[in-house]
Image (tube, rainbow, N blue to C red):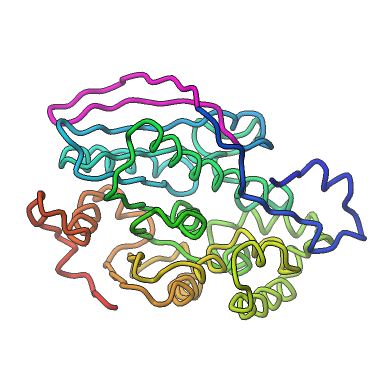
Amino acid sequence: MYRSKNLKEGGGKHTTQRDFKIDFSYAKQNIEFTQAFINKGRNYRESLIKFNSLYKYNKKGTETNEIYLFEPRGKALGVALILHGLGTKNITYILKMGRYFSKLGIRAVVPLLPDNYTRTSNGSMSGKNYFSADIYTTLNTWEHAVVDVLSIIDFLKANALWHERNFMIGYCLGGMVSVIANALNPEIKHNFIIASGGNMAELIWESPTLEFTRRELLKKKDQIAYLSDRERLRKTFQNDLKRIGEFKNIQEFLNSDIHPLMKVDPAAYAKFLNREKVTFLEAAFDKTLPKNTRKVLWENLGRPRKVTVPIDHITWLPFQRLISNIIINEMRFEEIKYRFANLGYLAILSK
């Protein structure tokens, strides 16, 4: 587990890359939870499940998992675990996606990732801590998100909510977290990554949405992980990405002297995924994520099947049903007829 407090006490000018310990393990246990039914449709039932996060070093305000469950009427054909993007505004549309899947007979699970929406840590802003100017806060937040996703799968399995035919959908931040979770848990059958990228150094210094991080970095002048040194950080990441192939497994990678931010970078974990289990949905007009950050994630995933859709990073959200139809068609549920997708026939499919 990532001990931000202990690292700060032991940090300083003598801190080395090996001092940043990333550990996604957690104590598995019987989970006590509450479940409140909040909505009922003709073909589905919606409830909110809450239970304490199994991550030991959570920040105040992030301690409780909040999971929206969309249960279809009758026997579920499969289960979709949908991870939302950074911040708050996109979550409403991701929940609509969950409802749509359930109406078609697929159980949908939408967890709120820590430090977003109603799980934002005290004194912070939704989504901000994933790209903090403080390296300790950033690592803590990513580690927490991955542990929560893995433990939620345990919870679903323990409560007969998992399914042999399962798949994960991750948008933006959710796509990044999903890559790490998939690399750590081979039980996930397929991963759909929507408008997502890798190479944290490029994201921090090139993405227009992370301007707030750059302002704070220039004020902070971080000397520990040199996040504020743009060229040094980018060069280090370029070199470290080339080294990923040297590691036999994830544990060896985590124990290495690779830059600590790389240890929560999906581009690194992509190397440990089976390309056949991934479908990459790229937004052709994405201005939020620099093109090379999307390219490096796709290439490190082994160049899996790509669906390039004429959308940008955000405007697809009100039309989430169209993307959902593309995903359903890709999954080839025999019980569900082909779903017409307006964007589907425009998409460029590649293998």
Residue 158 to residue 253: above or below: above
Q: Name the foreground residue: 74 vs 126.
A: 74
> What residue is rendered at 87% in x and 59% in y?
15
Extreme residue in the left direction: 337
The stretch in magenta equals 31-54
Q: Name the foreground residue: 79 vs 122.
A: 79
The image quadrant of residue 64 is top right
Residue 52 to residue 85: above or below: above
Identify the main secondary structure in magenta: strand
Query: Where is residue 87 shown, x and y percent of the image?
Result: 49, 44
Q: Name the foreground residue: 63 vs 311.
A: 63
Q: Name the foreground residue: 50 vs 30.
A: 30
Query: Where is residue 326 shown, x and y percent of the image?
Result: 21, 59
> What residue is rendered at 53% in x and 63% in y?
266
Left/right of residue 7 with respect to residue 107 in the rendered view: right
Instruction: State the quadrant of the N terminus.
Output: top right
Query: Where is residue 54 shown, x and y percent of the image?
Result: 58, 34
Residue 329 to residue 24: above or below: below
